[in-house]
Amino acid sequence: MSETPDAPRSPRDDRTQTYDSAVDSGERIGSYRLLTELGQGGMGQVWLAEQTVPVRRQVALKIVKAGMDTAQVIARFEAERQALALMDHPAIAKMFEAGATAQGRPYFAMEYVRGESLTTYSDRQRLTTRERLELFLQLCDGVHHAHQKGIIHRDLKPSNILVTLQDDHAVPKIIDFGVAKAMSQPLTAHTLYTSIGGFVGTPEYMSPEQAEMRNGDIDTRTDVYALGVVLYELLTGALPFERHLFKQLTFDEIRRTIREVEPLRPSTQVTRPGPASTDAAGSRRTEPARLAGLLRGDLDWITMRALEKDRARRYGSVSDLAADVRRHLTNQPVLAGPPSAVYRARKFVRRHRVGVAATVMVLVLAIAFGALMAVQAKRIASERDRANREAQAAREVSSFLVGLFEVSKPSEAAANSITARQMLDKGADRIQQETQLEPQIKAALLATMGDVYKSVGLYPKAQRLSEAALQTRRELHGSRSPETASSLAQLAEVMWRRGQLAEAEQMHREALDIRRSAFGGESLEVAESLAGLATVLTAKAEYSQAESLLQDSLRLYRTFAGEPHANPARVLTALANIRFQKADYAGAERLLRDAHDVDQKLLGPGHPRTIGDATNVATALLVQGNYAQAEAVYRDNLRETIRTLGPEHADLATAYGALGSALYYQSRYGDAEEVYRKALKIAQTAFGDDHNEVAVASGNLGQALDAQRKYAESVKLYGEALAIGRRVLGPQHPEVATYLIWMSGASRHTGKPAAAEAAAREALEINRVTLGAEHPRTAEAEGALGMAFSAQRKWNDAERHLIASANALTGRPGVEGDLSQVIREIVAMYEALGKPREAAEWRARLPK
């Protein structure tokens, strides 16, 4: 253990040596040789020592100082080391051995931690808020372990928490554990103590009950409070009560401050004027306003609940505190919440009983006199202002629409045959150029036009309009307003459709944070943001977190069932998508049918979303082998999509791709090729050349060509799909693995078995990590690798993979591949290995 006191002292510093240490550098105690004194307090010392037998290592050796070895001190020292011996946790420095010197003074040797304090490490590494919270959770786990062993630290603070690196991962280590409980006076130099009343701990981190100086009334919630202070400091770079303040106060004033004065919320602390706020934000790789936004809401509530003066309102345990932090990190509703107005008022009254009583008497008379007139005046003014706003809005919208439909100039009217697209473009241009519109109305029109462009698949224009709406609303309402959150969510949706997943995720998270602050955890707005964020995470193959968010969103939609816009169909579809990834096709079909029923009821059978639901159900049928039935649905929905959205809409890329898959699985490869080419052309026009939709269309067309032995073009298309997938989705995405499997087959067919092996190996590794060993796509990668080995006559390597592939194709639903081809390769392999019996057994398994 590295006991790093707040002010290390030399063992020869006479100013701090009340008693002769009686030990010196180089001296031996048991199997340890003392090297350097790390620190000391009134009753003990900690030395860096070297153990020579039975192992050679450096330890921290703690020993009672000469002259302090009274029966009481030794008894408490023994109790401390016995308690420490019970603990075994990676976040707590380990105790190795205990003993006594020749003079009978007890000592124990602990793990020597080379590290720096929690806050120093976090600031030097410029850890983000999320990274700091992850370190804090490790710390909470360690304190919880100690509590389970019946030990309360009572002096938790950053200087007693060192961060060290283990396997390149930062790990916090709690040191000096149990000192305040085991000894009459703690070791670290700046720990306050008085024997009168038992004032134990460090004032800045001390709980109100500790400040009461009734040590028999201390429980684990004292450590919860100290962890709240540590969390406050990690988040803001400041303490709830700064050291310089306590230096100006008397002993009793310090105690009163701890017991009665409420600290600033973390989000308020980081926006205080001065360089400290800028420095704190910079140490967290952000700006003060952005940092305040991150802290406002969940983290404010969590921290302030841990710092409650009344411990009955505090978290009941460290595990409860940690659980709320984890909920915040996974975007789940936290249990902590803002103190109610009644609670705050009650506390104010307790502090100012006499003044409040007098004030109430005066206020009762004043309120009784003015209430009627005030209510009446407010009602009249409110009605007048509302009417004026609505009239102005109506005039401006009317003027805008009249101007939009004017065709007085033949050049503008194009002989009165102006198209809907031209009118849409004209309207968008006019909104952006109009200087007389009220900003609030302009923002609403920009957002509406952005939605229209998104609905017709013109995503670049949708993005520009949505960005303009967002900027206007930020200027008009502020960065934390519900209107701004609405624009963030809209823009995130556009970015997701354009394949810009990182930007979409960031915007959805910001919108979710704002909506939780504005509406609380239970609202349709929060449900919408949870679903939007989950959709992006699903695209990034972060399925577990996405599913958790979707379940929360679905619960909220069902809570508000019957209200306008409470439509859970999108959430049901997103959950079905995750079921697809997990190869639960029957479960996906059930969810998709539920989504179709909901949209058909709420939107009608001809709505584009209802049509899309029917397409999704057909996809579930397709993967379960109902190819002809799926084809029929795809053709009906394709015709309806063209009728309602036009022949060039972006959604047609998906519609043509779905129909092509139904044709491909029925071995109608030429028909599939024709349809896939249409899908690719539309995707390239709608999304550009760097979008996952283009990668999917390229890969599908490559498969249709591959099946027709048109290998040269199929290899080119697979390469394009693979390059786009790696750029857009990342190199470890399951879609990338699919393109690699296809590329492996094409490479094998074109006489490049080594390249086929490399592609199959990469695909197998990706799918094992992201989807698991039992997933159908993992079995497909296994088969591709086996075929690549077989093509190189690497029979011993091929055997395991080919047999696994054959078994999966025989007995596992959802696995794609040619069973006959795999079995023929196995037969050829055993014949080449001189195993005719095994070859005959597998030949008998060939499908008839």
Image (cartoon, helix red, strand yellow):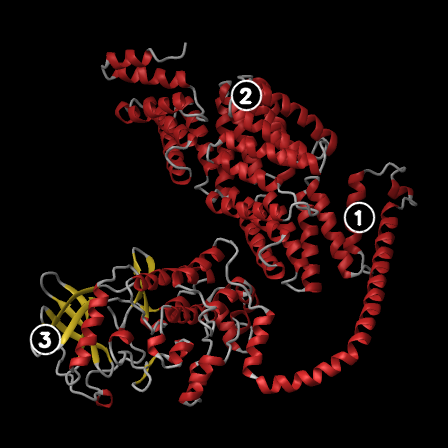
Disc marking residue 101: 3
Q: Tell me if residue 117 comes above or below residue 191 in the rendering.
A: above
Residue type at mark 2: give it: Asn
Please give the name of the residue rendered at 10% of the width and 65% of the height, measured from the top-left corner.
52
Q: Earlier in the sequence, mark 1 or mark 2?
A: 1
Q: Provide residue 652's location: percent of width, then percent of height.
A: 65, 32
Residue at the spot of label 2: 626
Q: CA distance from mark 1 to mark 3?
A: 89 Å
Q: Quadrant of residue 61?
A: bottom left
Closest to the observer: 142 or 776? 142
517 vs 429, left or right, is: left
Residue at the spot of label 1: 427
For the N terminus, the image quarter is bottom left
805 vs 554, left or right, is: left
**Label 1 neighbour load within 10 Å: few <14, some 14-19, many 20+:** many
Q: Provide residue 518's location: percent of width, then percent of height.
A: 62, 61
Residue type at mark 3: give it: Thr
Badge 2 vs badge 3, beta-carbon distance below 8 Å: no
For the C terminus, the image quarter is top left
Q: Earlier in the sequence, mark 1 or mark 3?
A: 3
Q: CA distance from mark 2 to mark 3?
A: 82 Å
381 vs 554, left or right, is: right
